[in-house]
Amino acid sequence: MTRLFNDPAAFADEALEGFTAAHRRWVRPVTGGVVRATATPAGQVAVVIGGGSGHYPAFSGLVGRGLAHGAAVGNVFASPSARQIHSVATAAHAGGGVLLMYGNYAGDVLHFGQAAERLAADGVETRTFAVADDISSAGPEESAKRRGIAGDLPVFKAAAAAAEQGLPLEEVLRVAERAGARTRSFGIAFSGCTLPGADHPLFTVPEARMAVGLGIHGEPGIGEEALPTADEAARLLVETLLKELPEDVADPAGRRAAVILNGLGSVKYEELFVVYRRVAALLGDAGVEIVDPEVGELVTSFDMAGISLTLTWLDDRLEELWRAPADTPAYRKGALDAAEPDPDRASATAAAQDTAVPAAPVVPAASDASRRAADTVLAALDAVARVVDAHADELGRIDAVAGDGDHGIGMQRGSTAAHRAAADAHGLGAGAGTVLTRAADAWADKAGGTSGALWGTILRSLGTALGDRDAPDAARVAEGVTEASAAVRRLGGAEVGDKTMVDVLVPFADALAAATAEGLSLADAWDRAATTATAAAAGTADLLPRRGRARPHAEKSLGTPDAGAHSLALITRAVHGALLDHH
């Protein structure tokens, strides 16, 4: 378990602070993560990687010459927010455009996509690429749905080495696509990991058993088998990966592969070497030439006891990029000439960071009626934060059944930050719309992950509908909730029946609209809709997930409601209480 921490909510920030203090030769901190401490040639494509904390040396440990130009670092097992990614990419940009790279998880896809849109609006040419190498998380026919695990490293490195060679953005992206298409990973675990502050692991493995096909966010495996010997584990990993070759690799014999045997947190290096001796022999027997193998902790999952094997099938170009030198805090290869820090660039970045946030908080003008409505909005957000805090552990337990168990802590971070930002705006005389939009930005930024992006969208949609000019009536609130429902579906791609928060949000919005159309007061209409939401959330227990991290473990989630749906239902009922108090 994780034993050394202060406030669990501050763990990721404090870890990043310590990391940068220890590695000033390679990195320097910026808002949202780190960038290289050394100069980047003007016009070079900036490769910016990122993801949640808890995976060191991914992602911050891979920043340096020959690898990433910057890394956006989110909270524990939660994607960084769009604001964090935008900040890091802006600091890393050297005039040649930006390639954003990340593992294929819903929250990362949402936040990196939003950051790319913001960078494009700034005039920065930007592309995105999601690594999807985990063969256990989807079949070959659905490879685009696969998770990104330890295959992140060879794909990141190929793209970054191409950028170092001065290739333009589109060619760097093509290299990433080529490397991603030829990378496969598979993992096993002997115990789950424990988040900072938790007193139990996210999943457990029975004595003398192992989980097969696990993720790197504490997700349980897709199956269990008897605990193997080291040689048996090696055979399982190798044979599983050799069963699925890229389309242009019909036979492994005579082929070259970059090989990574990755420890997930608490398997000792000596154990990895015992396994690797057999991995190397088995690949040799299959006729595979191993190129620059890596054995060690490269993409971890806190203290998870597990290992994964990654094969990247090389051609001449990919081998050149895999062998290229790199110098980062956690990954070094070959030799590079000494590089000096660029004080001018550091100063320019600091100035850019300073101008990215207003020097003083300013709120738009608002009518007295809207300010009075903001009182109710603030009370509702306070109720949201309190109900989430009270149920955070429960939400985590529900999420851990088939997901990564971080829903409770993520919602806690987001709702607390949203209430704080709303209170600040309210204190400055903001109207209802601005209070909500400030809360939306804070929730998305501090929570990260899928829920952060979606709740940011919900609050922003409501804020836009309410505005700062008039006193919002029940019909306008219902319109805002309806728009929030549509915006969440557009952004996340989920529909009713997928076992997500959408299964509650859509019927809640429909019920609220119908009740207000009948002429009910907002409090009465919300009460009716909240009852609908509660029933809909309970109904998700009978559904199989079709999206998100729970999808590979669909059968395990039967009988358990969706965590996002359940938290939304709790929130709708808590908000009703605030509406009654301010009726």
Image (cartoon, rainbow, N blue to C red):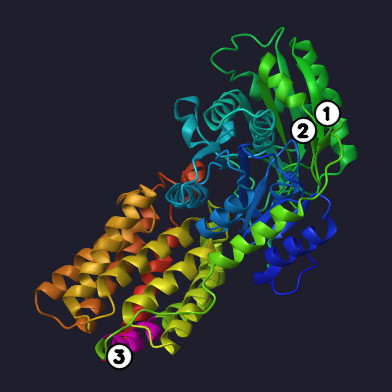
Residue density around tag 3, few if under 14, some if 14–19, many if 20 or more, within 10 Å: some
**Which of the labelled discs sits on residue 531, or is there none?**
none
Q: CA distance from mark 3 to mark 2?
A: 60 Å
Can you say whether 210 is above or below 532 in the image? Answer: above
Q: Which residues are magenta?
A: 370-380
Residue at 40% from the left image edge and 80% from the top image edge: 363
> In this view, which residue lies farthest toward the right?
270
Task: Place residue 559 in its image quadrant.
Answer: bottom left
Label 3 and label 1: CA atoms lie apart by 66 Å
Q: Give the mark, 3 or 2, whose residue is nearer the N terminus.
A: 2
Frontmost of labels 3 and 2 is: 3
Residue drawn 60% across and 67% down? 354
Q: Of 166 and 532, which appears nearest the observer?
A: 166
Q: Which residue matches tag 1? A: 276
The residue positioned 73% from the left and 45% from the top of the image is 63
435 sits left or right of 62 in the view: left
- Pick whichever of labels 1 and 2 is earlier in the sequence: 2
Is residue 201 visible in the rendered image? The answer is no
Mark 3 residue element: helix
Amino acid type at mark 3: Arg
Q: Name the residue carrying label 3.
A: 372
Q: Residue 331's spot in the image, x, y percent?
A: 80, 40
Residue 139 relative to residue 188: left or right: left
Quarter of the figure with the N terminus = bottom right
Specify the label residue 261 is tagged with: 2
Magenta stretch, main secondary structure class? helix
- Mark before the other along the chain sequence, 3 or 1: 1
Residue 241 point in image, percent of width and height: 65, 24
Crowding around mark 2 (Cα neighbors within 10 Å: few <14, some 14 to 19, many 20+) is many
Q: Secondary structure at mark 2?
A: strand
Q: Marks 1 and 2, how far apart in space?
A: 7 Å
> Is residue 432 placed above or below 144 in the rendered structure?
below
